[in-house]
Image: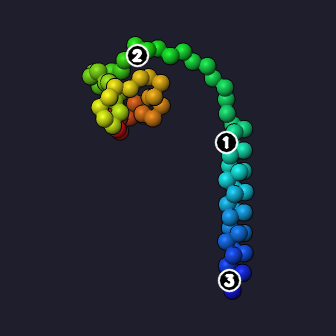
Amino acid sequence: MKNRVKGTIMAALVVGMTVSGAAGVYAGSNLQKISAYLKHNISFEINGKTFVPTDGKWKQIGPNRLQRFDLSSGSCPV
C-alpha cells in the first residue's frame, strides 16, 4: 500500500513537471523583442485629474514600474 502511494505521488510529480516545462517552452517561444525609451518626466491625467503613481507606502514610483497598473480602467489598485 505504501509503495503504491509513493508511486502515485511520483507519477503526479512527473506529470506536473512535464506540463510546467511545456508551458514554459510555449511562453518562451511567443516572446517578441521590443525597444523603448524611458521618459523620466512622464505624467498622467485620468478623468481630468493628475495621477501620481505610488507604492503601498505612498512613496512615488517611477515610470519603469508602471507595468503593474491598468490605467485604461481609470482606477489604480495599490
Please name which of the two marks, 3 or 2, marks the residue nearer to the observer.
3
Residue located 67% across and 60% down the image: 16
Question: Element under label 1?
Answer: helix
Q: Which residue is mark 2?
A: 42
Question: Element under label 3?
Answer: helix
Residue located 45% across and 35% down the image: 68
- The x, y position of residue 37, in whole percent, is 54, 15
- The x, y position of residue 50, in whole percent, is 29, 21
Of callouts 3 and 2, the N-terminal one: 3
Quarter of the figure with the N terminus = bottom right
Say whether residue 58 is left or right of residue 63: left
The kind of residue on which mark 2 rests is Ile
The kind of residue on which mark 1 rests is Ala
Say whether residue 76 is left or right of residue 29: left
The kind of residue on which mark 3 rests is Lys
Q: Which residue is mark 1?
A: 27
In this view, the residue farthest toward the left is 49
Residue 62 in sight here: yes
Mark 3–mark 1 distance (CA, rounded to whole Å)? 38 Å
Q: Is residue 40 above or below residue 75?
A: above
Q: Which residue is mark 3?
A: 2
Mark 1–mark 2 distance (CA, rounded to whole Å)? 31 Å
Q: How is the image coloured?
A: rainbow
Rendered image quadrant of residue 57: top left
Mark 3–mark 2 distance (CA, rounded to whole Å)? 62 Å
Of callouts 1 and 2, the N-terminal one: 1
Q: Is residue 78 above or below residue 16?
A: above
Quarter of the figure with the C terminus = top left
Dots 3, 2 in contact, CB < 8 A:
no
